[in-house]
Image (cartoon, rainbow, N blue to C red):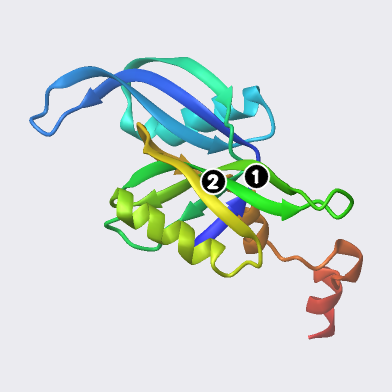
């Protein structure tokens, strides 16, 4: 399991999808994208879905997600997304009373018991006491992460001022 914290947007897109039998069918699907703004979320979902769409499309909804962290599974069989609410239990030092704070997560799993297992796997490595108050399957088809980090890794990360000029290197040879 890997987890990623970001600003997530839930988007719905209505488009003509080519079905397995070759027929075109209007469908509305929900996706999650990593973005900094509504505009970037709209642009991101259009770019990601462009290869699957034919004809007209419409973004029917964009809203900021209630969760800030997503647990991604490495297994190909985990093809569903579950929204889970956890309550973290802390003790207030002054009043010595139990305090609960609710946090929502999105979890990738193949089944409800699998989602519970994944949450326990990730949270088991923490020292925080928690209670799972709810977990439900969503209609989310997929999650698209921002590609800027991947593009940045591919580039040469040496600052320009530390790079030797190319012309000088060729002259020296």
Which residue is at a point 47% across and 66% down the rendered structure image?
121
- Circles 1 and 2: CB atoms closer than 8 Å: yes
Query: Which picture quadrant has residue 73?
Result: bottom left
Vertical placement of residue 79 versus 52, above or below: below
- The circle on residue 66 is none
Along the viewing direction, whichever of 27 and 78 lies nearer the viewer: 78
Residue that lies at the very extreme toward the left in this rendered image: 21
Tell me where residue 86 appears, x and y as whole percent.
55, 46
For residue 1, side relative to residue 6 (left or right): left
Quadrant of the snapshot with the C terminus: bottom right
Along the viewing direction, whichever of 21 and 32 lies nearer the viewer: 32
For residue 123, side relative to residue 58 (left or right): right
- The circle on residue 6 is 1
Which residue is at a point 58% across and 44% down the rendered structure image?
146
Vertical placement of residue 117 versus 138, above or below: below
Tell me where residue 95 appears, x and y as whole percent.
85, 48
């Amino acid at each position: 399991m890997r987890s990623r914290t970001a600003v997530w947007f839930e988007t719905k897109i209505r488009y003509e999808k080519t079905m397995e039998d070759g027929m075109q069918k209007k469908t509305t699907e929900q996706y999650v994208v990593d973005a900094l703004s509504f505009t970037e979320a709209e642009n991101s979902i259009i770019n990601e879905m462009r290869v699957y769409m034919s004809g007209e499309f419409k973004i029917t909804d964009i809203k900021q997600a209630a969760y800030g962290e997503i647990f991604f599974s490495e297994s190909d069989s985990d093809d569903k997304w579950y929204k889970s609410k956890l309550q973290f239990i802390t003790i207030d030092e002054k009043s010595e009373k139990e305090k609960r704070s609710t946090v929502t997560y999105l979890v990738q799993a193949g089944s409800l018991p699998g989602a519970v297992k994944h949450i326990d796997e990730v949270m088991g490595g923490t020292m925080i006491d928690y209670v799972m108050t709810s977990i439900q399957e969503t209609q989310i088809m997929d999650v698209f992460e921002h590609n800027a980090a991947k593009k940045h890794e591919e580039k040469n990360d040496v600052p320009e001022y530390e790079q030797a000029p190319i012309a000088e290197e060729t002259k020296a040879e």
